[in-house]
Image: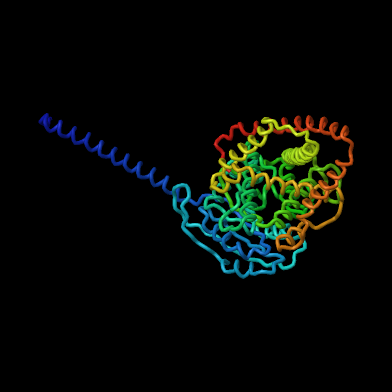
Amino acid sequence: MSTIQFETDPRQIALHRTATVSHDDATAEQDGLGLSRYVRQHFADIDALPTYRPVIGCIIPAYNEAETIEAVLRSLLKQTRLPDQIHVIVNNTSDETFELAAKFAGPRTAKKRQKGETARQTTEIFVHDIGENPDKKVGALNYGYSLIPDADYLLGVDGDTTLAKDCVARLEEEILSDSRIGGISAIYTIDDNGFRGLVAPLLIAGQRAQFAAFNMQNMLRGRNMAVLGGQCSIFSMKALREVMADNHQATPWVNDSEVEDSLLSLQIKSAGYLTKISARARASVGGMTTLRALDGQQVKWNYGAIDLMWPGQRGDTKGQPFHPNLRLRWAENFGMATNIFTRVAFMLLLAAALSINAFVFSPWWLIPPVVAILLNVRIAMSMKERNWKDVLFAASGIGAEVYMWLRAGHFVRAWVKFLSKVQTDNWAEQAKAERGSGNSHLVPLIVLGVSFVVLGWTWFQLPTLIQSSILWLGWPVLYVVTIAQTIVMFAKLIRRQHGYKV
């Protein structure tokens, strides 16, 4: 048997081994690169998948809004997050609101940059003229609600409210952050551009300060909002449906109250949801530029608030004095009553003391007005878009004092109307006042003047001993009330605002 022997060069074996190892490493490296490419492609495919975006339906009730409706629609089309649908509900209108809004009707597509990314967004504007509507704004809102049954959120915007370009995006972000939230209101201010004269700028500055103080109060209460104002608020459709079921209503809004926004806010809170004010979403609302219009609006608001918080059943309205959303209302009414008392009492006592040469000035009397001015200035400085007129209005003290007297008149008129149980259509009264009709705004001034004359005549019929006794008793009572009021103002003055801007 023969044996075959193979002679192998050790160098060849080494080369073979080296080649084998190199081939295995190359294969492994290729496998690794392939896996990396697969992973990258997999994540790219995931990112490319369509993500769920909540559907937001925007409702704009429009009553004679020819002067503002175009600006409102333009502000909505400039949003970084477009509403998916925009419905303009024209009602009871005698001007060109429908014709002006109709120019915007139809689908719109635009590239919007949000959260660092650019994406194509679409919306569609619908304009509806529902003609004569006995339920006015409530009827328009409910009609709009019926048009968006598949929406996740309802965005209510008034026909004179323009939104900051990121308003919708911020409202959406905040309401999505907590499923307990039933509605969020934007931070409101009043646009003060283009007003001339003396009365209109004064009234606008007063309303801006009033809104700023109200917004800051709500922000410092854990951002819990007592009233989700119709000017610009977003509502969970789920919460609205629960409100309808809980209260056996066919629609979210009902005309049981003069302030339909307040009633719905109470119902949302009672259904177990939170009602909030946004930390950053902003909107500019139309202000009242005449004494008549301001009186009509403020009396309606005050009357509606009283109707909701006063105990007892009045037709379909049931007072809810202990509802958590109405605690701030009680505080506001008590504060306004105190303001009226201190001002009227001081004027009467001062006039009475001067009439019998019993007046003695004390520097301590300057403390309350100084604290009030400082508080007003702090409120003005907390406004994100303040201007020199806001600061002057607060720092001078004169403008703020005049506006306080106007608010006192609205307050008294609302309470008198409520307690007299006279049935009036305050919506119609406000509309008439905005058209420049009626002189109801002069009633408080006339009553105050007549009262001073009657009291003055009565004062001079009293013996000197009784006059002195009245002053001896009246001044200490005024001192005590004023001291308590000053302490409350000082507490607000030094309270931390946690960086909030209104």
- In the rendered view, does 282 fall on the left or right side of 331? left
In the figure, residue 424 lies in which quadrant?
A: bottom right
Seen from this angle, which residue lies furthest front?
357
Q: Where is residue 390 in the image (x, y as percent from the top left)?
A: 58, 46
Q: Where does the C terminus fall, quadrant-wise?
A: top right
457 above or below 112?
Answer: above
- In the rendered view, does 490 fall on the left or right side of 22? right
In the figure, residue 289 lies in which quadrant?
A: bottom right
Q: Position of residue 439 (x, y in %)?
A: 77, 59
- Which of the two residues, 450 or 500, is positioned nearer the viewer here? 450
- Which of the two residues, 120 or 382, is positioned nearer the viewer here? 382
**Residue located 56% across and 66% down the image:** 104
**Residue located 67% across and 42% down the image:** 225
Label count reads: 0
Would residue 265 be seen by someone viewing this image from the given angle? yes
**Residue located 66% across and 69% down the image:** 95
Would residue 150 be seen by someone viewing this image from the given angle? no
